[in-house]
Amino acid sequence: MCKMFYCLLICLFVAVAARAQAVEGDWEGTLKVGDAELRLALHVKKDDKGALKATFDSVDQGAMGIPVSSVSFSDGTLKFAMDNAQASYEGKLDAGKNVISGNWSQGGAAFPLEFARAKPRAEAKPRTPKPSDIDGDWEGALDAGGQTLRVALHIASYEDGMSAKFDSLDQNLKDIPVTTIQRDGAKLKFEMKQFAATFEGTIDKELKTITGDWSQGGGSLPLTMKRKAAPAGEKKPGQ
C-alpha cells in the first residue's frame, strides 16, 4: 500500500512539473531598441501531431498573425525563428514566475527580451464617437536624403479622447497605432514609440493643412500633411 502511494506521489509530481514547464499559450513582451519600443506577442500551441507551432504579432506595427518558421522547447529553453524577418529568439523559461528571459537576434545584433504569460483581458468597452473638426485622413511626404516616403494619418475622436493610426505607404505599413496624440488649439502633437518618432505641427485656420516637423533618431524633417477630400456625398467630421 505504501509503495503504491509512493508511486502515485511520484507520478503526480511528474505530471505537475510537466504542466509547469509547458510553453503553450500566449506570451507578451516589449522589445526596446534605443529609444524605440515595440510590443510583441507570441502564440504557441500544438498541432494535431503534438508538434509545436506558433504565430507572432508586432502589435505596434499592426502586423498580426505572422507565421513563425520554426519553434522548439527543450530543457526549459524556447527557440523560434522567423525566416522572412531574418530574426530569431532564444530564452529560458522560469516556470515559477511565468516568464521567458532571453535575447532577440536580428540584423547581426541581439537585444534582451522577456516574455510574460498574457493575462486575461477585460472586454473592451465601446467608445462613444465625438467627432472633431480635424477627424479624417491626412496625407504628406517625408523627403529623407532624396528618398520620398509618403505617409498618412487617420484621426478619430471620442468622448474619452483622440486616437489615430498611421501609414507609411511606400513601406507597405498600414494602420500602425499611434501611441499618443494631443491637440492644443491649433497645435497638434503625436508620438510613435515603436519608431522613437514624434511629430509637432500647426493646423491652419482653414483646417486643410498641418505644417510641422517629424523628429526621429536625433534628427528632424519638415512634414506638411494635407487633408484628404472626403468622398462625394460624405459629410466631413463635425458637420
Image (cartoon, rainbow, N blue to C red):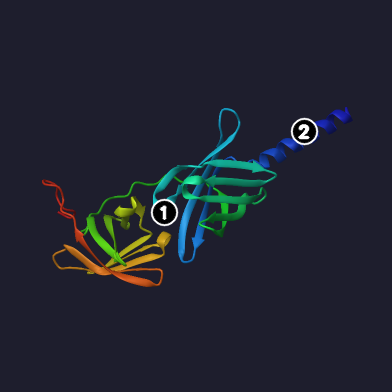
Residue nearer the viewer, 9 or 195: 195
Q: Compared to 11, does 28 lie above or below? A: below
Residue nearer the viewer, 60 or 130: 60
Q: From the image, which quarter does the C terminus lie in?
A: bottom left
Residue 23 appears in the figure: no
Q: Position of residue 172 (x, y in %)?
A: 33, 50
The residue under the point 46% across, 57% down is 38
- Looking at the rendered image, the disc whose residue lies closer to the viewer, 1 or 2, is 1
The residue type indicated by label 2 comes to Cys
Q: Position of residue 141 (x, y in %)?
A: 25, 61
The residue under the point 39% across, 49% down is 62
Residue 203 appears in the figure: yes
Q: Position of residue 140 (x, y in %)?
A: 24, 60
Q: Compared to 204, does 61 lie above or below? A: above
Quadrant of the rendered image containing residue 64:
top left
What distance separates the C-alpha of mark 1 from that of mark 2?
44 Å
Q: Secondary structure at mark 1?
A: helix
Q: Compared to 137, does 44 lie above or below? A: above
In the image: residue 202, left or right of residue 206: right
Quadrant of the rendered image containing residue 180:
bottom left
The residue under the point 16% across, 51% down is 230
Q: From the image, which quarter does the N terminus lie in?
A: top right
In the image: residue 195, left or right of residue 90: left
Q: Position of residue 61 (x, y in %)?
A: 40, 52
For marks 1 and 2, the one nearer the N-term is 2
Q: Give the residue pinned by disc 1.
A: 60
Q: Secondary structure at mark 2?
A: helix
In the image: residue 128, left or right of residue 96: left
Quadrant of the rendered image containing residue 7:
top right
Q: Give the residue pinned by disc 2.
A: 11
